Amino acid sequence: KNSILRCHVPLPNGKFTFLEELSPELHRLTSLDIINAVISSGLSYLQLNAGDASAYICLHKLFSAKHSLTGSDADRTQAVLLLMQGVSAVDHAAAGYSSSLHSNMLSPSLNTSIEILGALAAFHGAHGDWDSASSILESLVLRSEEHLPLYHPSAIAVRIDLAASYLNCGHEERAIKCSERVMLRLGTYLKEQEEAYFHSRRAHLLNGGYEHSLDILGTMKAYVAGLFRMKRREMAKIVGPTHPMSLLFHSCLGDSLSVLANCVGLSKHSESSLCVCCGSHSEAKM
């Protein structure tokens, strides 16, 4: 079936006029025919590129789509197996990374493994197996917190996903403890960043030295951008926007945006209106 599309789909061109030349025989193909053709091509590619983590993710999505059409347990099993193989491939590729670079540098493979395991947990959750989802997320929490700061956007999102899985399993106390840790970690980080930015601005006014506040502001912008990226994770789609843990994540995002807005607002005020003693504005004192 790998030849079906190859025979009837002409080469694309920049104006997309090739779509007008599609073979009429393609209209007789079912969705399953096309999925099988792409799967066959993907498996052939994977045999030659076993270390390509994105290929495992793509094939997982294809087998997930096929399972939704056929209901076959074999397709579901294959979808899970592909993600597990993807994690193994990522771990193997990253085996010598930490020893060859400074210990404080983050392996680019870590984000991929977090994405794959998160997708695997979401896949189990989508099929109602929240116990398996919780087990995978527990291991993912350990993996992420071993290499990432506790307040990192990925670490925050994984913790919230674990709380969501606990809640869906009926383990409310575990979910509450998990969510409380998230809020404590995020709150501590945001408070530290806001205070550091304020003191840096004031120190700059006092001594005219190097303005570290610009670095802090850039860090906060990157942090908020990271949280926005986490909104697109698979588990968020599975639990839905009205789930209590989805609301908690949006609360975290809102708190982060609020602190960023405070820092940006302070940076836009003129230095002459800022009191170096207390940090208030001269207009407020009058």
Image: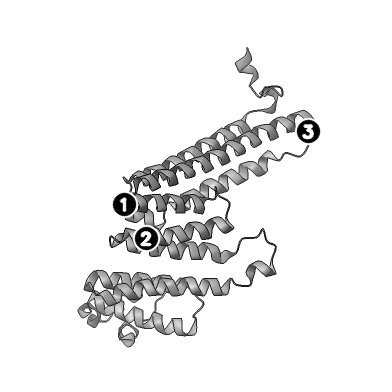
Q: Which residue is mark 2?
A: 133
Question: Mark 3, mark 2: which one is toward the viewer?
Answer: 2
Give the quadrant of residue 68.
bottom left
Q: Is residue 110 above or below residue 262?
A: below
C-alpha distance separating marks 2 and 1: 10 Å
Q: Which residue is mark 3?
A: 208
The amino acid sitting under disc 3 is: Gly
Q: Which of the two labelled residues, at mark 2 and mark 1, occupies the earlier sequence position?
A: 2
Q: Which residue is mark 1?
A: 168
Give the quadrant of residue 270.
top right
Depth check, front residue: 65 or 154: 154
Give the quadrant of residue 173.
top left
**Residue 126, position in %: x, y?**
30, 60
**Residue 236, position in %: x, y?**
37, 53
Q: Which of the two labelled residues, at mark 3 and mark 1, occupies the earlier sequence position?
A: 1
Residue 33 seen in this snapshot = yes
C-alpha distance separating marks 3 and 2: 53 Å
> Left or right: 3 with respect to 69?
right
* Label 2 residue SS: helix
Q: Is residue 14 above or below residue 225?
A: below
- Whether pointer 2 and pointer 1 mark residues with C-beta atoms closer than 8 Å, the reply is yes
Residue 122 seen in this snapshot = no
